[in-house]
Amino acid sequence: MTVTATPQDGRRGSSEPLWRALAVFRFASVGYAALRLAVIDRAEYSRPEWAWAVIALMAAWTVGTTIAYARPERRTRVLLSIDLAVTAGLLLSTAALQFPQAPRHGVTPVTATWLAGPVLAWGIRYGRRAGAIAALIMCGCDVVLIRPAAVGVGLNGLVLLLLAGVIVGHVARLDAEVEEERQHVIEVEAASRERERLARDIHDSVLQVLALVQRRGAEAGGAAAELGRLAGQQEAALRALVGSGTGSTAAGGAPGAPGNVDLRTVMLSAQTDRVTVSVPAQAVLLPKAAADELASAMRAALDNVRRHCADGTRAWVLVEDEPGLVTVTIRDDGPGIADGRLAEAVAAGRLGVSHSIRGRLRDLGGSASISSVPGEGTEVELRLPRRADAPVARVTGTGLGCGRGTQRPDPGHGGR
Amino acid sequence: MERSGPIRVMVVDDHPMWRDAVARDLAEAGYDVVATAADGAQALRLTGAVRPDVVVLDLQLPDMSGVDVTRGLRVTCPAARVLVLSASGEQQDVLDAVKAGAVGYLLKSAARPEFLDAVRRTADGDAVFTPGLAALVLGEFRRLASAPAADGGDTPSLTERETEILRMVATGMSYKQIASRLVLSHRTVQNHVQNSLGKLHLHNRVELVRYAIEHGLAGPSEPAGAP
């Protein structure tokens, strides 16, 4: 007798061991019932030959149900109900087989432990409650059989039957839940693997071609240079998109740091053919609000470069992460601002961008400084001290010990 | 370094369009492209025979990681200098390759003159410090400084001057600009930059040995996990 688990029935698939256990239990119980009849309770039977007939029926029914329950699609309510009815009927037949006073001597019904079969089946198939109800029905039959006077003697058995129904139902349900969760995890894993594969593919093909177009375009000059510039922008945008796909999962999955994002991902989105963003290799985790504010301040500074400097002006953004401090530096190679003019502009309230940058940083508890040397561009430095709770988040990003440099890069921080 | 004849370059990139474009650029500029390879194994096989001065290496290869190729090159052809040319967004990979012995890092989108100049400087033994690489090295020293002191106290650190200079490189300043800002010679600036990379290489070698011994990979005499 083989019981085959059908893989397509994912939810029920995990309860197969329970069904197999049930079949074993039923066969063993038939054997036990036969043993009791033959050896232990022999003298208590008024019609032993009929009792043997009942045992034979039990054996036949056990074979039948085992074959029937082997296929998940046959475990229907109807079959389980019939199983329950047949078992109850055989249990009740005891009344006609034993001497009336037998229950009072502690003799078990002819079915002995076999009566638990359908109770367990209901529990496995439909959970705790169904197991309990089936157990109560079976208990009811038993009580009718042994008559009120002897209930005390058989009470333990009834309670155990009820418990068995409930517990097996509970285990089966737990099993199904674990299975469901497992399926979910597998799906999520497959999805993220697929996303990583896509990112890798894009990285290996599209980004390379775009970078090449950008490079060739710049050399060809004229209209081609414009094409090259556009390709460069698209390359930067696509790279940021691909990077953020894996980056955000890394930040989201950082233990102990819910709501933290990787400042690098946010900052790298500003990279264009004119703006170079340089970051450390490790994730720079900050609360999302703080990262967004820093990004806004950076964008304000870059906007300022675009607005006030010549077209070809380049800018660099540097992200630094020290234990107590995150620093973002934005430097351009524009003409710079003459010494007195910066203070003058601030005094006159004209340097809106400086106000907005300083204001944002002040609100975050940090500071911003703007310095400029005429002819050497302008440098904006945003400094954001980490709060006391932040170092925890940092440790998750960096605390991988001294062997790290020799291992494969941690996928969470690879930032592909 | 004295060299007779043109600089010998090997290009390793799995993208045929890129490989050819880079090789053509180099050839047109008078470099001797001695070999091209599409994967790490091929690159390692060829280096022994062609003895390039510079290996232009893409980190994303189908068969091996860029770090492993870099490490392998240190064994098969110690004289070759590795210039990493990466598509970007691979900070950890770049850092690992640099720690494994690569001496320069350039974005693939870099303009042709910038690229050709980088190859020449790599051949001359200068570290090609783009802003991106400077930021990675700065970050790595900060990570080492804040990591638990399980390293036994030999954690390398940057001097204040080195940090200052690396920050300037990372914000796009040229050596010339830095030299004039700090009133130093161009050569001094270059030495400071070179030293910071040297400390990292040295430390990484120590780490490699320790890692190999701890994991029973090799005896102390055989540190750099040969491929």
Image: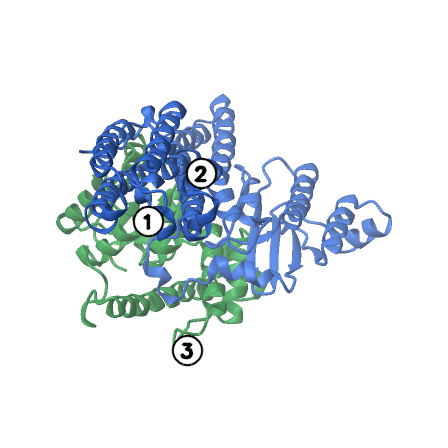
Marks 1/3 same chain = no
Figure colour of chain B = green
Local SS, label 2: helix
- Residue B78 vs residue B70, the one in the foreground: B70
- Residue annotated with mark 3: B153
- Residue A54 vs residue B42, the one in the foreground: A54
Is residue A99 in view? yes
Q: Is residue A111 above or below residue A214?
A: below
Local SS, label 3: loop
- The CA span between labels 3 and 2 is 82 Å
Q: Residue at x 64, y 37 (%)?
A: A310
Q: Residue at x 21, y 64 (%)?
A: B217
Residue B137 appears at what percent x and percent y? 45, 59
- Residue A325 vs residue A218, the one in the foreground: A325
- Residue annotated with mark 2: A144
Graded by Cα atoms within 10 Å as few (under 14), some (14 to 19) or many (20 or more), the crowding at tag 2 reads few
Chain where mark 1 sits: A
- Residue annotated with mark 1: A107
The answer to which quarter of the image holds residue A88 is top left
Quarter the C terminus of chain A occupies: top left
Q: Specify the amino acid type for callout 3.
A: Gly
Q: Is residue A408 left or right of residue A314?
A: left
